[in-house]
Amino acid sequence: MKADRLFLGLLIVLVGVALIASSFEYASLPGQAYGAGTMPRVVGSFGILLGLALLVQGWRQGAARQRFARADWARDRRGLAVLAVLLAVVVYILAAGAIGFIPVAGTLLVVLMLLGRVRVLPAVVVSVIASVTVYVVFSRFLLVPLPGGPLESLLW
């Protein structure tokens, strides 16, 4: 489905405002001018600018615009792959806290690779290696708190 620029612009502005508003809840780093909320504020600011640009373009289109229509990408496999990635992000957000980073990320990587027509064995091997590597690098070296889940006690 393809929405007009006024609708998308308003939606993107609202998401940008929500990102900026939620970024103030993150703790700042001691002795630093930036912290965990810096990047959400930057992304939210760019989102607001992009949304405003879309609103202006949509306003200029005026009555000639079409509210909703089926987009070309929705008929294409690549467009559906984009939807699969977005759905994977939502599944990760909902499941990672209870199940843990490694099993959720590994499963989602396998599914996404299979959708991308990768054979099963390479998809599983790459997913396991990538999930464990990302977990170790981010949680142990960069000290980013990733959800461990029930497998964390087995790893350490």
Image: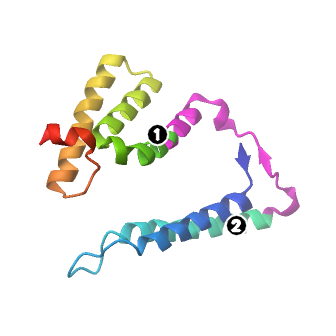
Q: Is residue 62 magenta?
A: yes
> Residue flagged by tag 1: what amino acid is it?
Ala
- Residue ranking furthest to the left: 156
Position of residue 100 measured from the top left corner of the image (x, y, whole percent): 31, 43
Q: Which residue is mark 1?
A: 88
Q: Write the start and end of the magenta stretch as one range.
A: 61-86
- Residue ranking furthest to the right: 63
- Quarter-of-image position of residue 62: bottom right
In the structure shown, which secondary structural element does the residue marked by tag 2 occupy?
Answer: helix
Q: Estimate the spatial distance between the alpha carbons at disc 1 and disc 2, rounded to whole Å.
A: 29 Å
Q: Earlier in the sequence, mark 1 or mark 2?
A: 2
Q: Residues within 10 Å of mark 2 (few under 14, many from 20)?
A: many
Q: Is residue 113 left or right of residue 5?
A: left
Q: Which residue is mark 2?
A: 55
Quarter of the image for the N terminus: give it. Answer: top right
Position of residue 18 measured from the top left corner of the image (x, y, whole percent): 53, 68
Indicate whether 122 appears above or below 140.
above
**Main structural element of the magenta stretch: helix, strand or loop?**
helix
Q: Residues within 10 Å of mark 1 (few under 14, many from 20)?
A: some
